[in-house]
Amino acid sequence: METLGDEPWDVVICGTGLQQSLLALALSRSKKRILHLDPNDYYGENEAAFSLQEADSWAATHGGLSTGEDSSGETAAPTPSARQNIFKNASVWTHPEAADRGLSFPRAYSLALAPQIIHTRSKLVERLVSSRAYKQVEFLAVGSFFVYNAEATDATSRLSRIPSSREDVFSTQSIPARSKRSLMKFLKFVIDYDSEEHRPLWQGQERKPLAEFLAGEFKLDENLRRYITALTLMLDGRVTVGDGLATIHRHLTSMGLFGPGFCAVYPKWGGSSEIAQVACRAGAVGGGIYMLGTKAEIKDGSGDGEISLDLSNGLSVRTAKLVTSQNEAASDTPTITRLVAVVSSPLETLFEVNVEGAPTPAVAVVAFPSSPESSNGPIYASVHSSSTGECPAGQSVIYLTTQAAPQAVQRLESALSDLLAAVPLSDGQTAPACLYKLQYDQSLSARVASVTERGSVSTFAFPSPSLSLAFDDGCLDTVRDAWKLVVGDDAPEDEYMVFQDREGVADDDDAYD
């Protein structure tokens, strides 16, 4: 410990969020002197995964209201930390009979702050493969996508599985033959929508509502339009043609890439948090020094040649490059409300294999569309089985998300109740009960990295994580920018996160590349 301040570091990275951790992975073969800190005593920062005890503690820290009102609408004086942080209004609830109903010990759970699915054609998957880090991540299949239909007379028939492949369309009994032909025409179009042949059909209509485009150009009925719109995973309810075609194209072209029956994956043990930990371990194998529970403050009087940092453990260090993250909520960005629920049922009918040879899925997605006359956006529920490692066997974890609004929490609670009532029970099963709930609001920082350069001294602050329900590849561009800042412009672009296996390390060795 005494030697940390003796020589200057090439870079000090503050925070172990996904972007900082991917930067550590990218630098792991650079022979740079890297000091990686986190003020928290856990990995993942804004993409962490928590035990129940950690979730309780995190909620207590982020429980402040930042709008100047309390939950009853009365004016309140917000604290500075609540006013600035991207997380706010966090709270937890535990069933009064939770232990009797099956709630296990706290560390049996791993609740993710970033439960994003990752499409198999994501650039993140490409980078994890090229860096060899994929060998240390267990990816699970994301299976069926459902739409909840509140108008169905029988509660257990309100979930409709969305057909998203040719085989799906022809095998489903819920779509009339004529509608199947229209849907197949659209699916064939969107696979190659950006080709010279198909561009004239949609160019000039990019800002038009997708639902209108589907009705006008493909004669899709209301149910099919609801299905297609749900696949976009967009929370604002105002899906445009430009955005909608791009996201549906990503969904369909990802289908079957790594095996039949799924288009996306989810990392076991807490989603993005697991990737962050794998990337940090790669940094440690490459010689990086890691210190959790350590804050860093820029010391007054830092010169032009280096930055001096005072660490909370009493040490001082010097560096020419400092990488941090932005955790202040910007005033002009959207906010989501999320409800995380631990449920006393495996909900196994949501995780059925529907394609021969497909793996058993560990994640299912349920869309609750907004009504045309409502100003509220849709709700999405990402249902995780115990195979994700996020809960014990016989239980499941449900992540419900919608845009923040005055009645958002009540809408999420109602959607949770509707979902549990809609899942058919096996013989002898009791009605599922909610054992534990974590609820919070999440906003965005400024959407561009903050970069300050004075001579050879540079500071770089990553923007906060995307609020998208599927991983946003855009954050990888920012990681590359930070990598360039550290290694310099002379570094070959083709070496960015492209590594060979380390000598003497087998696939099953506990080492990270």
Image (cartoon, rainbow, N blue to C red):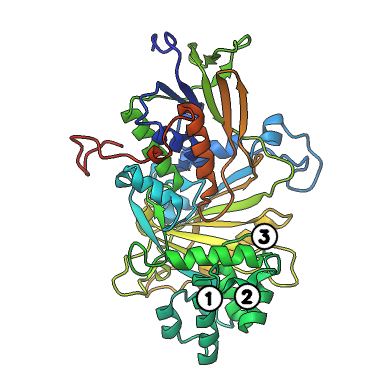
Mark 3, other Cα within 10 Å: few <14 / some 14–19 / many ≥20: some
Q: Give the SS element for disc 1.
A: helix
Q: Residues within 10 Å of mark 1 (few under 14, many from 20)?
A: some
Residues under numbered marks 3 and 1 in contact, where contact means CB atoms less than 8 Å apart: no
Q: Which mark is residue 189?
A: 1
The type of residue carrying mark 2 is: Leu
Residue placed most toward the observer, 45 or 186:
186
Q: Which residue is mark 2?
A: 201
Q: Secondary structure at mark 3?
A: loop
Q: Are marks 3 and 2 in contact (CB under 8 Å)?
A: no
Q: Position of residue 230 (x, y in %)?
A: 57, 68
The percent coordinates of residue 276 (x first, y second) are 43, 39
Q: Position of residue 259 (x, y in %)?
A: 32, 65
Q: CA distance from mark 1 to mark 2?
A: 10 Å
The numbered mark, 3 or 1, whose residue comes first in the sequence reads 1
* Residue holding disc 3: 236
